[in-house]
Image (spheres, helix red, strand yellow):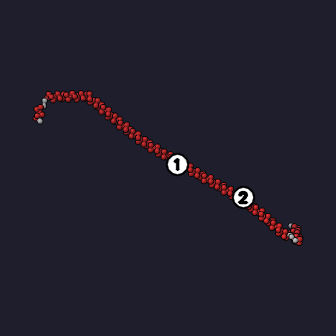
């Protein structure tokens, strides 16, 4: 350390301090302000970038929420359309069933009417056949009963007596 003190020169130290102060003044006047200005500008641009990124995040969140709500609304509309389609299908099926029942009832009623008409016609035909058979049988019986003259006289006299009494 003694050697260091031996080489120390006050004049040199003085000029070094003056040169250092002059350099400091020049740097402050010409370099410090532009460097600080560029640093401040850079800091402001970074802040603006961060703010715009935050705004973009908010917008993305809002878009996601809007998408979710639109998707939920679309699902509700889809469910409503499906429900309406099912109701329409059920209505069409029930209407078709009712129509088929009505037509079936009409057909059954028409068949019953036709059967009744056929039955009446058959009964009438049977009655007429029975009447014809009865007449034929009566005719045969009368022919056999009236075949003799004496028997004819008896029947005539009996019919006359009945006629007088009435």
State the mark number for residue 49.
Answer: none
* SS for dot 2: helix
N-term-proximal mark, 1 vs 2: 1
* Residue 4 percent location from the top left of the image: 12, 34
State the mark number for residue 82.
Answer: 1
* Residue 103 percent location from the top left of the image: 64, 54
The residue lying at 70 percent from left, 59 percent from top is 115
Disc 1: CA contacts within 10 A as few (<14), some (14-19) or many (>=20): few
Query: In which image quadrant can residue 104 be found?
Result: bottom right
The residue lying at 79 percent from left, 65 percent from top is 133
* SS for dot 1: helix
Can I make out residue 97 in this image? yes
Direction bottom: furthest residue:
150
Decide if residue 49 is on the left or right side of residue 131. left
Give the quadrant of the N terminus.
top left
Cα separation, mark 1 vs mark 2, equals 52 Å
Can I make out residue 154 in this image? no
Query: Which residue does the numbered mark 2 point to in the structure image?
Result: 117
Looking at the image, is 143 positioned above or below residue 34?
below
């Amino acid at each position: 350390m003694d050697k260091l003190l031996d080489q120390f020169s006050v004049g040199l130290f003085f000029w070094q301090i003056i040169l250092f102060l002059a350099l400091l003044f020049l740097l402050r006047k010409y370099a410090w302000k532009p460097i600080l200005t560029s640093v401040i500008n850079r800091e402001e641009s970074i802040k603006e970038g961060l703010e715009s990124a935050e705004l973009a995040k908010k917008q993305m969140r809002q878009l996601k929420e809007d998408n979710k709500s639109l998707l939920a609304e679309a699902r509700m509309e889809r469910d409503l359309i499906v429900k309406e389609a099912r109701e329409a299908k059920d209505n069409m099926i029930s209407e078709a069933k009712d129509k088929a029942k009505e037509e079936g009832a009409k057909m059954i009623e028409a068949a019953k009417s036709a059967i009744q008409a056929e039955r009446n016609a058959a009964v009438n035909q049977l009655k007429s056949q029975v009447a014809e058979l009865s007449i034929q049988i009566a005719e045969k019986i009368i022919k056999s009963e009236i075949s003799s003259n004496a028997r004819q006289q008896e029947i005539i006299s009996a019919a006359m007596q009945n006629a007088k009494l009435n």
